Image (cartoon, rainbow, N blue to C red):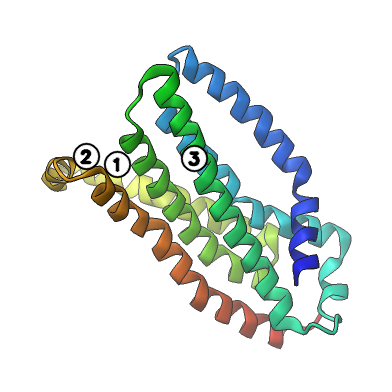
Amino acid sequence: MTGLIWKDLLVSMKTIRAYAMVMAIYFGMALMGIFNFSFVSSFLSVMMIMLPIGAFSYDEQAKWERYAMALPLGRRRVVGSRYLFTLVVTLFSGVLAAVVNAAAVLAVQEPFLESMASALSVLGAGLLIVDILLPLCYKLGPERARPYLYALIFLPIIAMFLAYKLGVHVDLSWLDQLGASSPAAVLGIFLLFPLVGVAAMVPSWLISCRIVERKEF
């Protein structure tokens, strides 16, 4: 399975290099005050968490699935390697977000707690989206599953906008109370977001395994 994880990493290297260039530009713009660092770290989390979905496109171009499913590892382990790759990317995204936010503290004295809370929230939401999309990619293929990605991203935004226009207000006073808590407690609460996404990987993996076991390649 380690070899399969390395395969996903290697085929994603071109995308990672492109992301690194984009992030370097955004980091420079944040230093100039155009963006704040919380946006940069959150955007970084979104880009990184999309790597497992992008790996499906490369597999489809190379007809990789037909070969991979014939490996002695078995279909469940082949599927599991993609989820382990997702977990590795998630951990790496969290570390990078912490590094970016720590640099923000040193460079412009931006509050580390707020930026990190934002990055963890976005990382958790992105991981939940990936948990939904991975079974769809196995079922439909990456191209046919792509509209579902757009729906998962934009439908909540549209719903919140409509709710705002209709005068529906959400009580966010608990955030003020949360701000009075210790930094460790606040980070612990926001750390729950990606942990929920990691926990949701288990049923997502089981569904993907069921789809792949019934699929003919």
Give the quarter of the figure containing the N terminus. Answer: bottom right
Determine the residue positioned at 28% across, 54% down.
189
For marks 1 and 3 on the same chain, the one whose residue lies earlier in the sequence: 3
Determine the residue positioned at 37% across, 35% down.
115
19 with respect to 7 (left or right): left
Using the numbered discs, state the Cα–Cα distance from disc 3 to disc 2 in whole angstroms: 33 Å
Badge number at residue 165: 2
The local secondary structure at tag 1 comes to: helix
Does the image show residue 28?
yes
Give the quarter of the figure containing the C terminus. Answer: bottom right
The local secondary structure at tag 2 comes to: helix
Does the image show residue 168?
no
The local secondary structure at tag 3 comes to: helix
Tags 2 and 1 touching, CB below 8 Å: yes
Q: Choose between 35 and 66: the one closer to the eye.
A: 35
Determine the residue positioned at 58% across, 49% down.
92
Kind of residue at badge 1: Phe
Badge number at residue 161: 1
Location of residue 143 in the rendering, given as x and y in whole percent from the top left corner: 69, 57
Location of residue 55 in the rendering, given as x and y in whole percent from the top left corner: 72, 56
Badge number at residue 97: 3
Q: Tell me the crowding category of disc 2: few under 14, some 14 to 19, or many 20 or more residues within 10 angstroms, Cα based.
A: few
Using the numbered discs, state the Cα–Cα distance from disc 1 to disc 3 in whole angstroms: 28 Å
Kind of residue at badge 2: Lys
Give the residue at the far bottom of this rendering.
214
Q: Does 43 sit above or below residue 184?
A: above
For marks 3 and 2 on the same chain, the one whose residue lies earlier in the sequence: 3
